[in-house]
């Protein structure tokens, strides 16, 4: 059940005492993983909690298992879409939310800020090449990079493309969902491209992966059905298909993802405190990688296209990149 922690004055006073002035947080609950490692039953209950206090039903489970269900039942009509430029109050799980964020911010030299790019720093656009990170967001990333031990962007784009798009020095850029950290992935690049050339659908070459977008398809359901067939063929060819936000991505069969990238970066920098923000299926791996650190904050940038498992696994849920920007300013 959602609740608000005290009146506005009380919340402002609590935030100021912890160095967290700014927008108020709608509180539901945030965890401190250090305290949960010894309570596995508590962690299990947390993972099955739904963000708005809803009960999981058959339709929700179908959305998790069948991307076609999303196309059938999640509309993109203008009247039903969240305005990505209008920040709203974040949903936070736990009355200790502000205190936990304050702990992360109190010792920035011990903490990492890890961020996806598209849908997180940059609003999703019809075509990937149209996406851009707003100047005010770039300025905030630059401030964080100067303050924290590590700020990294872990993107589905190539690392070079993510660097071009974000354009902030002092940030670590990891591309292809973490595959750039795995040397074996390069051995599959030409094989993946060769497969993509045989598909009757335009594809985006991301170096180590390829993506088939269907956001602009006239018949989205027909497009999805066709790409599901492509996914089956790719799987039979030894590749790893994965659906995301209006996209099918083909990856090499390598044990590398955003989760392995998160663990690599934290280990490399000797850090045990981290915040990760993501908006799509591949970010679930990054959320899971934060089960070990002393302090972990998982932020889901939600949308009509966001997978249930991402939102369910988040500590904080915001509804747009603009709302995430307001939250980052608390750090």
Image (cartoon, rainbow, N blue to C red):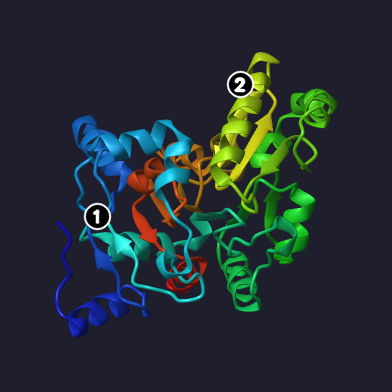
Which residue is more in the foreground, 83 or 149?
83
Q: Using the rendered view, name the quadrant where residue 119 is placed.
A: bottom right
Across and down, in percent, residue 167 comes to: 74, 66
Question: Which residue shows up at 23% across the image and 38% down it?
Answer: 57
Query: Left of 18 or right of it: where is 301?
Result: right
Cα distance, mark 1 to mark 2?
34 Å
Using the image, determine if residue 204 lies above or below residue 181: below
Q: Using the rendered view, name the quadrant where residue 115 is placed.
A: bottom right
Q: Residue beneath label 2, please?
A: 232
How crowded pointer 1 is (Cα within 10 Å; few <14, some 14-19, many 20+) is rated as some
How crowded pointer 2 is (Cα within 10 Å; few <14, some 14-19, many 20+) is rated as few
Question: Which residue shows up at 70% across the image and 45% down it?
Answer: 175
Q: Quadrant of the N terminus?
A: bottom left
Q: Quadrant of the C terminus?
A: bottom left
Residue 248 visible, this orientation: yes
Across and down, in percent, residue 79 comes to: 42, 70
Using the image, determine if residue 139 lies above or below residue 191: below
Query: Left of 107 or right of it: where is 99?
Result: left
- Which label's residue is closer to the chain start, 1 or 2? 1
Which residue is more in the foreground, 129 or 298?
129
Q: Nearer the viewer, mark 1 or mark 2?
A: 2
Q: Residue beneath label 1, please?
A: 52
Across and down, in percent, residue 73 comes to: 39, 47
Using the image, determine if residue 109 lies above or below residue 186: below
Which residue is more in the foreground, 41 or 99?
41
Residue 214 — which label?
Answer: none
Local SS, label 2: helix
Residue 258 visible, this orientation: no
């Amino acid at each position: 059940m959602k609740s608000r922690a005290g009146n506005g004055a009380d919340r402002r006073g609590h935030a100021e005492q912890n160095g967290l002035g700014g927008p108020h947080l709608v509180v539901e609950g945030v965890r401190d993983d250090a305290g949960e490692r010894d309570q596995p039953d508590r962690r299990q209950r947390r993972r099955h909690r739904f963000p708005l206090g809803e009960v999981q039903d058959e339709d929700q489970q179908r959305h998790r298992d069948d991307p076609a269900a999303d196309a059938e039942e999640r509309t993109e009509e203008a009247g039903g879409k969240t305005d990505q430029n209008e920040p709203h109050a974040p949903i936070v799980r736990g009355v200790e939310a502000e205190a936990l964020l304050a702990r992360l911010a109190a010792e920035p030299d011990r903490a990492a800020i890890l961020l996806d790019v598209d849908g997180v720093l940059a609003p999703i656009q019809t075509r990937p090449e149209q996406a851009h990170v707003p100047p005010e967001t770039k300025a905030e990333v630059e401030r964080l990079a100067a303050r924290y031990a590590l700020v990294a962007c872990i993107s589905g784009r190539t690392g070079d493309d993510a660097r071009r798009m974000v354009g902030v020095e002092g940030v670590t850029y990891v591309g292809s969902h973490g595959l750039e950290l795995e040397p074996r992935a390069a051995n599959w690049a030409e094989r993946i491209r060769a497969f993509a050339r045989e598909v009757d659908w335009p594809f985006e070459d991301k170096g180590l992966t390829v993506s088939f977008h269907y956001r602009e398809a006239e018949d989205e359901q027909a497009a999805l059905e066709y790409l599901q067939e492509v996914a089956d063929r790719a799987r039979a060819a030894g590749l790893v298909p994965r659906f995301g936000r209006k996209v099918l991505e083909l990856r090499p069969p390598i044990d590398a993802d955003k989760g392995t990238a998160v663990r690599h970066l934290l280990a490399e920098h000797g850090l045990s405190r981290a915040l990760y923000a993501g908006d799509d299926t591949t970010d679930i791996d990054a959320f899971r990688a934060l089960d070990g650190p002393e302090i972990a904050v998982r932020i889901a940038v939600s949308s009509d296209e966001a997978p249930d498992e991402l939102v369910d696994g988040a500590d904080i849920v915001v509804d747009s990149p603009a709302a995430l920007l307001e939250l980052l300013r608390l750090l």
